[in-house]
Image (cartoon, grey):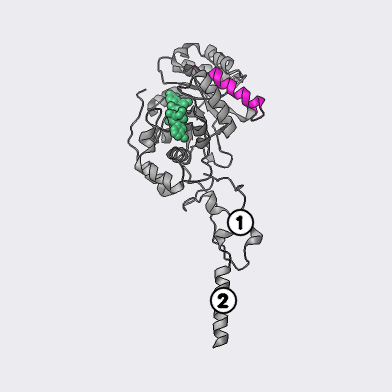
Amino acid sequence: MEKICSLLLTLLLLATCAPKAADLPTEPTVAPAVTGPSIVSEAPAMTEAETAQPVETAVPETTEQPAVEPTAAPAFVVEGYPAFDFETKTVTLNSGYAMPILGIGTYALSDSQAEHSTYWALKAGFRLIDTARIYGNEAGVGRGLRRAIDEGIVTREEVFITTKMWTSDFSNGDAAIDGSLQRLGLDYIDLMILHHSQPRNDVDAYQAMERAVESGKLRSIGLSNYYEPEDFDRLVNATMIRPALLQNETHPYHQSGEMKAHIARYGTVLESWFPLGGRGNTQTLFNDPTIATIAAAHDVSSAQVIIRWHLQAGNICIPGSSNEQHIIEDYDVWDFALSEDEMAGITKLEQNNRFADY
Ligand SMILES: NC(=O)c1ccc[n+]([C@@H]2O[C@H](COP(=O)([O-])OP(=O)(O)OC[C@H]3O[C@@H](n4cnc5c(N)ncnc54)[C@H](OP(=O)(O)O)[C@@H]3O)[C@@H](O)[C@H]2O)c1
């Protein structure tokens, strides 16, 4: 009897002293990047923390390891629509060029604000900058880019610059392209898009961009603010190069589903402007109970949840900001993934409601 008691006591002591998995040292922060849409998984995506493995040598041989699913972001899959690669954080456009799927927008920033935001964004990891002739800050974007290049943060080839041709320039497209190149201080622009549909002369403007692709001044070309499939087709049917991208107002309350399905037939990708709702509207989206609840569950901000939703929904996302902390936060979206249920919850927020009226 005494022997049995002593054996039981020893077993009890061993059980309480054995290391728990949570106490074991884990891998340093380096973990595989979230891999994306090439893996179509029915299972909810796992976060980086969930997939982190204890250091091999510290794991007692007898400890059973839970089965670990590969980290995967739910994919947006529509036939013809370009696939997002979450490992390289890029999408290959129908022009053949790789474009980052997350960038920074510069609407409403002064020339000098745009310079700082561009520099901070490149420092934070962004490789896509969105500007426009009408914003009056192309020169600032060019200075911010040159500063980052001079400091060795990036090379020109690593950065993707988008600008837009304004409607009043549509009859003088060749000169407008040269003007943007000169203000940006670049010898080529990665992507130029027509800022708005304007049936009177947008075909002329697009043909000027096609000539500039031929001469190497532009790499890819596309459109912005075409909200009807027929209007998009009108332009496509009158021109030669398929638009690489369509930039439209897109966010959880206006998800652009119809246009996204339509442009897939041309291999055209959607880019969201007002991804967070736009200046003055962001709190409406940030405080939406569905978005706020998901943010709390992942211990991230509402802005990060919305950005992540865009990326997993197959929308290139370009949140605008003049605030360095926001810029850092907006790029910090690679270590968590929304589950299919969470994605579906945000999809249900669709109201077909635009915040802007243009
Ligand atoms: N093609 C078009 O017609 C068109 C139209 C509009 C916009 N765009 C492009 O799309 C880009 C994005 O749109 P947008 O800038 O107008 O609107 P947005 O990105 O939806 O929202 C910008 C607002 O979000 C705030 N913000 C950003 N990150 C935040 C964070 N982490 N936490 C809290 N607030 C945050 C910014 O404030 P802070 O400055 O304080 O960070 C700013 O007030 C534009 O910058 C522009 O490049 C294109």
Q: Range of the magenta residues? A: 136-155
> x, y percentage for residue 297?
43, 48
Predominant SS along the magenta part: helix
**Label 1 CB less than 8 angstroms from ligand 1:** no
The amino acid type of the residue labelled 2 equals Leu
Q: Secondary structure at mark 2?
A: helix
Question: Number of marks in the image?
Answer: 2
The residue identified by callout 2 is 11
Residue at 36 percent across and 44 percent down: it is 290
Residue at 39 percent across and 29 percent down: it is 229
Q: Residues within 10 Å of mark 2 (few under 14, many from 20)?
A: few
Tell me if residue 39 can be seen.
yes
Q: Quadrant of ligand 1?
A: top left
The residue identified by callout 1 is 25
Q: Quadrant of the C terminus?
A: top left
Decide: is 184 above or below 13: above
Is 139 magenta? The answer is yes
Decide: is 165 above or below 348: above
Decide: is 58 above or below 228: below
